[in-house]
Image (cartoon, helix red, strand yellow):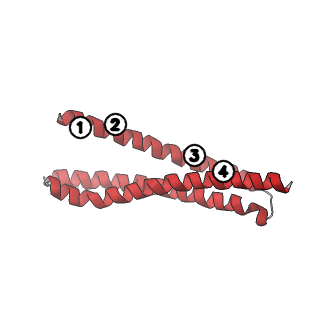
Amino acid sequence: MKEDLNSLAARLAEELSKYIYFLLAASGAAIAYALEQADGKTLTNDLIFLVLALIAWCGSFYFGVRHLRLYRQHMIENAKALLADETFEQMQNRLEPLVVKMEGASNHQYLLFIGGVFLYILWRIAVLVNT
């Protein structure tokens, strides 16, 4: 039973890691593409949505990296707790603040990425309407 739980936890961690890395890659690609779109353009009101999309994607990238750093710290703290032979409650008290921060970083990463997508779409619509 314990091996099944460990296996499940390892699979969940792997899937979450893939998800975080996917959003990191997508944010990086979106930043590069949006910068390419803005290349050579003068900063005017027409670019407001594009600039906001870039800011959102940069924020998404930041929170993705933050999540990975918090996950690394979580693994280190978990190892320390195991080496110290802490009780479940002690481990939970040690790790719970990191888990809450990781969840927050993951949620921010996702929301900022999606927000950037909507802002980019609004920019494209604004460009089409103004031409």
Q: Amino acid at mark 1?
A: Leu
Tell me: 121 left or right of 26. right
Q: Label 1: which residue?
A: 5
Residue 26's disc is 3
Q: Nearer the viewer, mark 4 or mark 1?
A: 1
Q: CA distance from mark 4 to mark 1?
A: 40 Å
Q: CA distance from mark 1 to mark 2?
A: 10 Å
- Categorize mark 3 by other alpha carbons within 10 Å: few (<14), some (14-19), many (20+): some
Q: CA distance from mark 2 to mark 3?
A: 22 Å
> Do the residues under discs 1 and 3 have CB atoms within 8 angstroms?
no
Residue 11's disc is 2
Q: Earlier in the sequence, mark 2 or mark 3?
A: 2
Q: Residue at the far bottom: name it.
A: 44
Question: Judging from the image, what secondary structure is the residue with disc 2 in?
Answer: helix
Residue 45 lies, in percent from the top left, at: 77, 66
Q: Amino acid at mark 4?
A: Ala
Question: Judging from the image, what secondary structure is the residue with disc 1 in?
Answer: helix
